[in-house]
Amino acid sequence: MFDKQVYIDRRNELKKSFKSGVLLFPGNDEAAMNYPGNTYKFRQDSSFLYYFGIDIPGMTGLIDLDEDKEYLFGYEFTIEDTVWMGPQPKLSELAGQTGVEFSKPIAELKKFLKSKKKKQSKIHFLPPYRAEHILKLSDLLDENPNRLKSKYSKKLIEAVVAQRSIKAEEEIAEIEYATEIAYQMHTTAMRMAKPGVIERDIAGAIEGIALSIGNGVSFHSIVSKNGQTLHNHFHGNVLKEGDLLVCDAGAESLLHYASDITRTTPVGGKFSYKQKEIYEIVLTAQKNAINMIKPDVKHVDVHLTAVKIIAAGLSQLGLMKGDLNSAVKAGAHALFMPHGLGHMMGLDVHDMENLGEDYVGYDNTTKRSDQFGLSYLRLAKELKPGFVFTCEPGIYFIPELIDLWKSQKKFKNFINYDKVEEYRDFGGIRIEDNILVTKTGYKVLGRPIPKEADDVEAWAKS
Ligand code: GLY
Ligand code: MN
Ligand code: MN
């Protein structure tokens, strides 16, 4: 964990948004994989991690604003635990590591909360996203599990989002380290993108890198020659000369900060002419989008700039037609780029998505569109110094979507379906980097990972 002062300062900052009540942060528990004793790799809740830093299951952090006290509720490890797991710290030692004065057995938490409720103290908690948490909170707070979901604290969400959105120096260093792991992963994937290799050969190799120098992957790796499927987690195809391999993969640093990078590599080391034309459109869209990034720019405008460049490029190739501003306004480009340009990134790869995407990426002045494509934009609001987010344009040829829109004659004034047919087996291309908003502009985080077409080819040939 960071120095305990980091967590003390974070909690003090959070407390400024509240005058009274209790702020409750249940950490995650072990989650059973196929039987209770065989669990998934433990992942702490990110907000608990942010305010308390302790990477151990079964803990709850509590800030009592009425009494101005902080508590860590948890377990004392038993001799049996020591036999199976080795020596463990005492609960009071764990509390001390994060600068919390009081520690109590978790069995006393219910009674504690009951007494606070009796005194009409408001208990603030974030929306639970694991079934176990819903049940635990419903027991602790004497709430029906079905109703509990709507009882979370909007005020706590807003305060946490405001704080976690602005990355401090030590967090940026963690994210930079996560992108360094991604550098190793992606250059390995490029080198391995050879005919005869199975996608899982590459997925296994790069996930091994993430585990060996970090805390493993930050999300399920996408390593696919069928990159037109946006989140394709199937890794069973054999690569052949001429395929395009989309690799969208990232790692967690040892303190759980994420990276999320995508590169697209020609299998065998040479883009075809047709592939390179599309690749250059995506790269140009990404570079121009990144160049726009600075404080107070709305990210929805960055997204719209990127998709206009994509529409213009596709129009030059004869795939789109008509007035491009009207085409983009209507959403016709979404046949080729049906997703948003990027999302916040931090302790979660889609940072704070469990708190509600609209709290993280939207605000009173920026409302979510309901148009297909634009509606998937996770970050739309004004950018602020300290935001870290992804920039990930792509062009995809999704046969099922093409067939549907064609049969509906959808946007036939903007899309040249005859030309699109020539690309139906093309696959997809995405390029993704991780960006920090600085006081005056932006910084692309991490060591540059090859993305110029020539550089990608050189790595793929090596
Ligand atoms: N890695 C999933 C995404 O780019 O959002
Ligand atoms: Mn990604
Ligand atoms: Mn992403």
Image: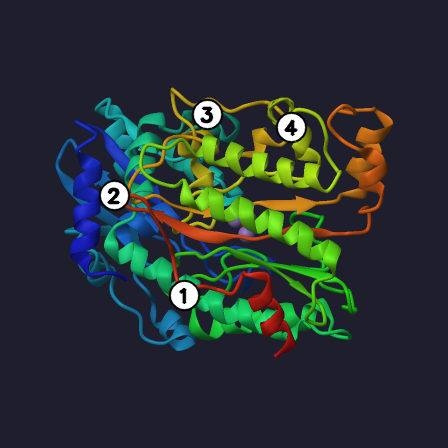
From this view, report whether residue 72 is shown above or below residue 154: below
Of labels 1 and 2, earlier in sequence is: 2
Instruction: Check residue 439 in the rendering and tell me which mark sits there, or answer none.
Output: 2
Q: CA distance from mark 3 to mark 4?
A: 28 Å
Q: Position of 295 compared to 416: left or right? A: left
Assess mark 1: CB under 8 A from ligand 2? Answer: no
Residue most toward the front?
316
Judging from the image, the colouring scheme is rainbow
Task: Name which residue lies at 80% across and 29% down.
Answer: 405
Of labels 3 and 1, earlier in sequence is: 3
Instruction: Check residue 372 in the rendering and tell me which mark sits there, or answer none.
Output: 4
Q: Position of residue 410 (x, y in %)?
A: 78, 24
Q: Position of residue 84 (x, y in %)?
A: 43, 75
Q: Secondary structure at mark 2?
A: loop
Q: Is the residue under label 1 in contact with that under label 3 (CB below 8 Å)?
A: no
Q: CA distance from mark 3 to mark 1?
A: 43 Å
Q: Position of residue 73 (x, y in %)?
A: 28, 49
Q: Position of residue 178 (x, y in %)?
A: 41, 62
Q: Which residue is mark 3?
A: 150
* Disc number lying in front (2 or 4): 2
Of labels 3 and 4, earlier in sequence is: 3
Quadrant of the rendered image containing residue 328 = top right
* Disc number lying in front (3 or 2): 2
Q: Is the residue under label 2 in contact with that under label 3 (CB below 8 Å)?
A: no
